Amino acid sequence: MDADYFKEKTSEIEERINRFMDDGLKLFIGSSFQTHSIPLLHIVTSISKEIPVYFIDTGFHFPETLIYRDQIAELFGIEVINTHSVVSKNLQCDADGNLYFASDPDHCCYLNKIQPLEPVLIAHDVWINGIRAEQSAHRKKMGLVIKGPFDTLRYHPVLHWTNKDIFYYRKLHNLPPHPLEEKGYLSIGCEPCTRKVDPSGDERAGRWFGMKKTECGLHTELVGNR
């Protein structure tokens, strides 16, 4: 996997993004600022710095994620727009006073991830999104361009990229990893719902560990027209 290999792959992304922009569509990219999400962010911001970059700041992220976000923003020369829940944390509790991430993680994700992104979707036409088929059976069923909510399109440029593609693209462009990766965190979400995983197993096994939950809802609820 050399520069020519990735030139072909990124040229396809550039062509489609330019087509969207030529059609007058408003694009944005969302990034979780994990190691595996940085290649797509690098590609998109290399094509155009005018495409806004959004980060869903749930208020529960690891401090290392926020440091990494700022490091990457400075490295790429971009401004990151943070979204936040409109519901304060003291109101995100059940009747027993437990925060929803412990008692109702689906509702927690709704308040802190899905709801804050809805105004962004309403204001744009195309959501550039870094899901990959290799990550889960659900994501494997998704297409390269599909309908999103509020009459948007979801564009998944790296849907068919493998972990090996991600690794060698990062190596080619000397892109730094998330600081928690070396400590055994391969898929990093909110701190209360993320655990270290066995490197030989499923990289997303550490998300919502012990719960009957595998997705936050961004890629299940925010699909199709609403």
Image (tube, helix red, strand yellow):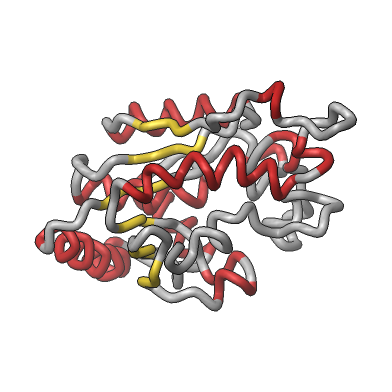
For this rendering, which residue is in front, 211 or 203?
211
Residue 124: image x %, image y %?
29, 50
> Where in the figure is residue 38, as x and y percent of width and height?
43, 46
Q: In the image, what residue occupies the spot 67% across and 24% down? A: 89
Query: Farthest residue toward the left?
Result: 22
Q: Quadrant of residue 191?
A: top right
Quarter containing the N terminus: bottom left
For image coordinates 19% across by 46% down, the residue present is 48
- Count of labels in the image: 0
Residue 193 vs residue 88, the one in the foreground: 88
Task: Give the percent coordinates (x, y) of residue 173.
Answer: 34, 47
Q: Nearer the viewer, residue 14 or 141?
A: 141
- In the image, taking residue 125 as reference, residue 219 lies left or right, namely right
* Vertical comparison of 78 with 223: above or below: above
Up the image or down, 105 lies above or below 137; here it is above
Residue at 27% across, 64% down:
13
Q: Nearer the viewer, residue 79 or 20?
A: 20
Q: Is residue 202 left or right of residue 115?
A: right
Q: Residue at x 39, y 69 (%)?
A: 147
Residue 176 horizontal side relative to residue 182, left or right: left
Residue 145 at x, y percent in the picture: 36, 71
Q: Is residue 92 above or below residue 226?
A: above
